[in-house]
Image (spheres, rainbow, N blue to C red):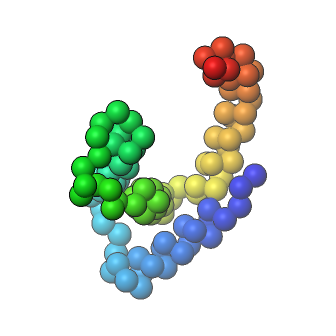
Amino acid sequence: MAEGIKETQAVVDQWIKNHGVRYFNELTNMAQLTEEVGEVARIIARRYGEQSEKESDKAKDLSEELADVLFVTICLANQTGVDLQAAFDKKMDVKTKRDHDRHQNNEKLKK
């Protein structure tokens, strides 16, 4: 299973303590997460989808926006006591058991 998420949670927590003063409350972080996901969606829709990309959007960095999503997600996990490593490992186990045959047998994915 993946390793390192627990360490990443600790790095974010230390950053908050050293630079961020405190965590924003959960509702504020949820709103921020929604905003960051929207920025990712905008880049994906314009760069990889059918919408045209404005000149002002071409400089936007998808990796930076995905990192913003990850950072806020980790903040929410930290402040609500979620062990993301354990949750991720459990989710991968569930998805592996549930979805292996389903995806292998999906004709739409063989195109």
Q: Position of residue 98 (x, y in %)?
A: 69, 26
Is residue 76 visible to the viewer in this orientation of the structure?
Answer: no
The one of 91 and 80 positioned closer to us in this rendering: 91
The correct choice, above or below, for 91 with respect to 104 in the image is below
Relative placement, left or right, of 10 versus 79 is right
Q: Residue at x 32, y 51 (%)?
A: 39
81 and 95: which one is in front? 95
Residue 78 lies left or right of residue 57; in this view the side is right
Front residue of this view, candidates 25 and 105: 105
Residue sitting at x 61%, y 48%: 87
* Percent of width and height locating residue 8: 57, 68
Which is nearer the eye, 104 or 94?
A: 104
Determine whether, in the image, residue 18 is placed left or right of residue 8: left
| Residue 1: x %, y % from top left | 75, 52
Q: Residue 101: image x %, image y %? A: 75, 21
Point 61% across, 17% down: residue: 108
Quarter of image, res 80: bottom left
Among all residues in the image, which is located at the extreme bottom?
A: 18
Residue 50 falls in which quadrant of the image? Answer: top left
